[in-house]
């Protein structure tokens, strides 16, 4: 399971007899580690079910018999499949850390990081974060842990490869988001040095009761919805990329607002402001994907191949209303790209997201003198009606059904 999520693991082979253990150990290469394999034993060390640095076939054969006899005496009802054989990863300066996951009834999957090994309970080093993670959150998890100092230059040991730990944290986050039935996960220990990290043991607890009818329903915070990323052609040549907006797009969003005409800004915000105030910019760029969505259209303005300098040329968004059945939309298109099919595509895209989220109705307010926007709404099948309370606006609405 860990390998399926590209988490580096040590090669592990199950041996069901002493002779099979000797053969596997010879093939894997000495020295090896032996660990009891039983679904009824969560912590192998508690029952003396771990042996390290076995350097010969004789020692492997004898340890197989001793270990299985010891475990049967301590846990007579446990099902014992055999022992697993792993090659020992030699290294004078590796550190032992752990990465864990537990499903909280209120907050969903909670990830933890800290010092690992047999002293994990005694050291009690826990840095916590809700799934899903991004790279920034993964870095902060590492820095908040007590073992972080030892991951730097430490008593003659070189600094560890922190990028490899960030990689594992991000992959465990993906696992937590994708597999709701994983309610507990302990990867302990993870051996880490200047060359990289590798997981040498793990414990997983599954619960079929945790499976939900909708993806990501078990999460308190929805992950970045990359399934809505698309590349579309412009009507008169070139193409643009549409994807969900994320917080790092704040500068692009501000540049888009600054770059449009005063009339376009007024049509969008019903205000004469020249740029977005910081509090409004933060609110528009920090998206709670559970109740709202913003799609940003980007074109590559770089002159050198491989040098991406993307410019935002349009944003469409909706925010779900308190009834949880309808939403209100907004649209802004750069003046240089008006009349090139961009507004139609951005509205169709945001409608599809709203429909996908199970909403029933989408509506918005359009200034009566915003003729191009009203024309666009009618072309998309929106109904346009007058506002008795405010004659300066038209109410445009559309009933969401199956596409």
Image (tube, helix red, strand yellow):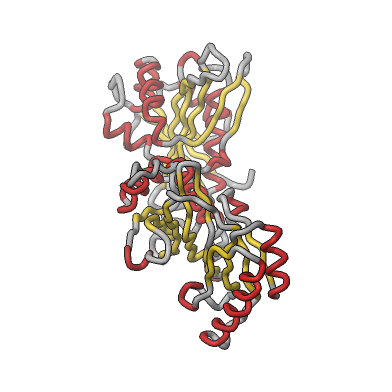
Q: Nearer the viewer, residue 332 or 126?
A: 126
Residue shown at the point (46%, 76%) measured from the top left? 46
Place of residue 138 in the rendered image (x, y in percent of width and height, measured from the top left): 41, 45
Q: Give left or right: position of 272 versus 396.
A: left
Quadrant of the snapshot with the C terminus: top right
Tell me what residue is drawn at x 40 percent, y 32 percent.
Answer: 248
Relative to residue 10, is residue 349 depicted above or below? above
Query: Residue at 32% of width from left, 31% of height from top?
Result: 281
| Residue 384 spot, x, y in % from top left | 48, 33
Asked whether 226 or 302 is in front, the reply is: 302
Q: Is residue 359 visible?
A: no
The answer to whether residue 394 is seen in the rendering is: yes
Judged from this view, the residue extending furthest toward the top is 303
For the image, the number of numbered tags is: 0
Q: Quadrant of the N terminus?
A: bottom right
Which x, y percent locates residue 325? 47, 51
Choose between 259 and 391: the one closer to the eye. 259
- Apparent side of residue 78 relative to residue 26 in the rendered image (left or right): left
């Amino acid at each position: 399971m860990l390998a399926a999520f590209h988490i580096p693991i040590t090669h592990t082979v199950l041996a069901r007899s002493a002779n099979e253990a000797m053969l596997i150990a010879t093939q894997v290469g000495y020295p090896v580690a032996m660990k009891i394999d039983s679904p009824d034993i969560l912590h192998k060390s508690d029952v003396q079910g771990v042996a390290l640095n076995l350097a010969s076939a004789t020692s492997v054969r004898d340890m197989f018999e001793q270990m299985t006899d010891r475990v049967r005496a301590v846990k007579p009802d446990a099902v014992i499949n055999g022992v697993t054989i792993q090659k020992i990863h030699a290294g004078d300066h590796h550190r032992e850390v752990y990465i864990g996951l537990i499903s909280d009834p209120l907050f969903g999957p909670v990830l933890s990081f800290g010092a690992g090994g047999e002293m994990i309970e005694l050291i009690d080093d826990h840095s916590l974060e809700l799934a899903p993670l991004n790279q920034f959150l993964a870095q902060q998890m590492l820095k908040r842990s007590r073992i972080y100092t030892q991951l730097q230059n430490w008593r003659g040991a070189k600094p560890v490869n922190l990028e490899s730990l960030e990689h594992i944290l991000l992959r465990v986050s993906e696992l937590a988001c994708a597999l709701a039935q994983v309610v507990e996960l302990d990867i302990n220990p993870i051996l880490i040095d200047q060359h990289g990290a590798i997981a040498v043991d793990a414990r997983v607890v599954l619960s079929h009761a945790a499976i939900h009818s909708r993806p990501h329903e078990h999460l308190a915070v929805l992950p970045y919805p990359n399934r809505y990323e698309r590349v579309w052609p412009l009507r008169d040549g070139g193409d643009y990329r549409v994807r969900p907006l994320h917080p790092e797009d704040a500068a692009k969003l501000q540049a888009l607002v600054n770059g449009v005409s005063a009339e376009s800004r007024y049509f969008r915000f019903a205000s004469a402001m020249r740029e977005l105030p910081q509090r409004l910019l933060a609110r528009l760029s920090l998206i709670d994907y559970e109740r709202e969505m913003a799609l940003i259209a980007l074109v590559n303005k770089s002159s050198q191949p491989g040098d991406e300098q993307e410019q935002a040329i349009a944003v469409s968004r909706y925010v779900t209303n308190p009834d949880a059945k309808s939403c209100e939309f907004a649209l802004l298109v750069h003046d240089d790209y008006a009349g090139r099919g961009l507004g139609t595509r951005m509205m169709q895209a945001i409608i599809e997201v709203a429909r996908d989220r199970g909403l029933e109705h989408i509506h918005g307010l359009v200034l009566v003198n915003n003729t191009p926007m009203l024309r666009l709404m009618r072309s998309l099948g929106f109904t346009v009606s007058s506002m008795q309370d405010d004659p300066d606006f038209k109410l445009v609405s559309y009933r969401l059904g199956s596409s």
